[in-house]
Image (cartoon, rainbow, N blue to C red):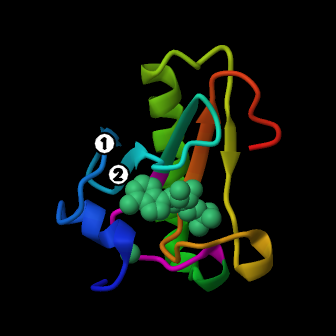
Amino acid sequence: MKDCVFCRIIARETAADVEYEDDAVLAFRDIYPKAPVHVLIVPKRHIASVMAMEAADAETLGRCLYAARKLGEAKGFAERGYRLRVNCGPEGGQVVYHVHLHFLAGGRTSGA
Ligand code: AMP
Ligand code: ZN
């Protein structure tokens, strides 16, 4: 989608620090980290929000969850754990309308 910052990152038109990639998912560091490790996990296919998802998007979002597992293993958090957060809509704190998981790790993430 043309005016979507995450679609531009996926198209490599905007720079980002990529942490994980597969055929369905890209994960890159959040520019304003709220935890020692703060990575955004996004589907390569544009889905605006959980609030706009269709049943057919469920597999894609499941791939994002599975990517979180892979990212956690790659970054050494398989045992320590991490927080996954999905902001949904205006009152849920969503600012970027390309659905994403916040992967937060490395210490105190409960307030992040
Ligand atoms: P949300 O409030 O859940 O929509 O989160 C959007 C997140 O995207 C925020 O944590 C921002 O810091 C982050 N963000 C926005 N633009 C970029 C970008 N160009 N590269 C990396 N992270 C970004
Ligand atoms: Zn997008």
Q: Quarter-wise, where is residue 80 in the image?
A: top right
The residue that mark 1 highlights is 18
Around disc 1, counting alpha carbons within 10 Å, would you say few (fewer than 14), some (14 to 19), or many (20 or more)? some
- Label 1 beta carbon less than 8 Å to ligand 1: no
In percent of width and height, residue 108 lies at 76, 27
Q: Secondary structure at mark 2?
A: strand
**Picture coordinates of residue 84, whole percent (x, y):** 67, 45
How crowded is the residue under tag 2: few (<14 C-alpha within 10 Å), some, or many (20+)? many
The stretch of residues the image draws in magenta is 41-50
Can residue 42 be seen here? The reply is no
Disc number lying in front (1 or 2)? 1
**71 lies above or below 42:** above
Q: Is residue 81 left or right of residue 49?
A: right
Magenta span has 60? no
Q: Which mark is residue 26?
A: 2
* Mark closer to the chain start, 1 or 2: 1
Mark-to-mark CA distance, 1 and 2: 7 Å
Residue at the front extreme of this rendering: 32
> Could you tell me which quadrant the C terminus lies in?
top right
Picture layout, residue 93 above or below residue 74: below
Is the CB of mark 2 within 8 Å of ligand 2?
Answer: no
Residue 84 to residue 80: above or below: below
User: Looking at this view, is 66 or 34 the one in front?
Assistant: 34
Query: Please, what is the dominant secondary structure of the magenta stretch?
Result: loop
Type of residue at label 2? Leu
x, y (%) of residue 33? 56, 42
Viewer-closest of 105 and 58:
105
